[in-house]
Image (tube, rainbow, N blue to C red):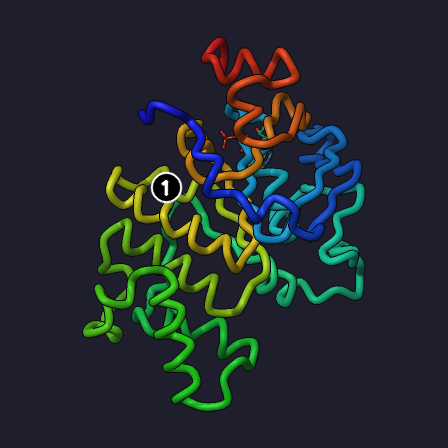
Amino acid sequence: MRATLVNAEKFVGVANGALKMAARDVRVFYGESEALHGVDLDIYENEVLAFIGPSGCGKSTFLRCLNRMNDTIDGCRVTGRIELDGEDIYDRSLDVVLLRARVGMVFQKPNPFPKSIYENIAYGPRLHGLASGRAELDDIVERSLQRAGLWEEVKDRLEQPGTGLSGGQQQRLCIARAIAVSPEVILMDEPCSALDPIATAKVEQLITELSETYTIVIVTHNMQQAARVSRRTAFFHLGNLVEVDDTTKIFTSPSDGRTEDYITGRFG
Ligand SMILES: Nc1ncnc2c1ncn2[C@@H]1O[C@H](COP(=O)(O)OP(=O)(O)OP(=O)(O)O)[C@@H](O)[C@H]1O
């Protein structure tokens, strides 16, 4: 563990981004059971925002609301309002496939398609008509892999299966796949929990680099990780968003006793 939890200096200059997403009174029901009890949260451009809290408190449920992944869960219902650049993402006329390109997602377990490394990246841009020919597609594939810090490791084996890479490489491949469709927001649900410390360090470094271009929301069980990568942290407890503040403040002088109990290890 590091001596200090937070290196605040690296976040200078990104503290006052424009509003990117806004959630108001968001409630999520699984059948009759209410899992999230009215969450209000603003997310700013180019910030890294971490969600922390004990198991089952609703972090992943809320994250999935942000690109409507909950739509894919039977019996799940979302109420309230979530806006992306001022637009209601639950509006009936909204194209969900396009939304998920704008608000991409990286999951806990790396999940490359059972296709070549090249095809893993090329699939999205092709689907969304982002390349006018093979040369442009090649260029997107190379740039995405470079951004994800994977190009040097895979440039000579682009036709080999993505599933043949190491776990850490697979996760960076999934990040490259998310980047390839030029998202604005990237949601990450415990992206390092299946990785070893070296692969984790690479992904954390990548998150810091990517925040120059994208807005990143990350769920993590690892408080040191939240402290290392995020500018702000939101603490969830029993389906409530208890508080959101600068990461430094959350880990040094939180406003709510429940946050204090959690970060000092009294529960969770
Ligand atoms: N598909 C589902 N069907 C029914 N209930 C669900 C489903 N997914 C989550 N829940 C419930 O919603 C609540 C919040 O779960 P969620 O997975 O969002 O929490 P979490 O904070 O992400 O937990 P963890 O840290 O363990 O991943 C829990 O009570 C959970 O049992």
Inspect the image, locate mark 1, and give the three-letter code of the amino acid beneath it: Cys
**Residue 224 placed where, x, y %?**
40, 29
Judge whether 9 appears above or below 244 on screen.
below
In-front residue for pair 145/60: 145
The residue carrying mark 1 is: 192
- Residue lying farthest to the top in this orientation: 266
- Residue in the picture at 61% in, 22% down: 237
Judge whether 21 appears above or below 234 on screen.
below
Instruction: Locate residue 101 relative to residue 162 in the image: left or right.
Output: right
**Residue 71 placed where, x, y %?**
66, 51
The local crowd at label 1, few if under 14, some if 14 to 19, many if 20 or more residues have their Cα within 10 Å, is many
Instruction: Locate residue 98 relative to residue 173 in the image: left or right.
Output: right
Q: Quadrant of the N terminus?
A: top left
In-front residue for pair 70/238: 238
- Residue lying farthest to the left in this orientation: 156
**Residue 104 placed where, x, y %?**
54, 57
Q: Quadrant of residue 157?
A: bottom left
- Residue in the picture at 31% in, 55% down: 170
Judge whether 91 appears above or below 239 on screen.
below
- Residue in the picture at 42% in, 76% down: 140
In-front residue for pair 242/230: 230
Q: In what element is the residue under mark 1?
A: loop
Q: How many marks?
A: 1
- The quadrant of the rendered image in which ligand 1 is seen is top right
- Residue in the picture at 23% in, 58% down: 165
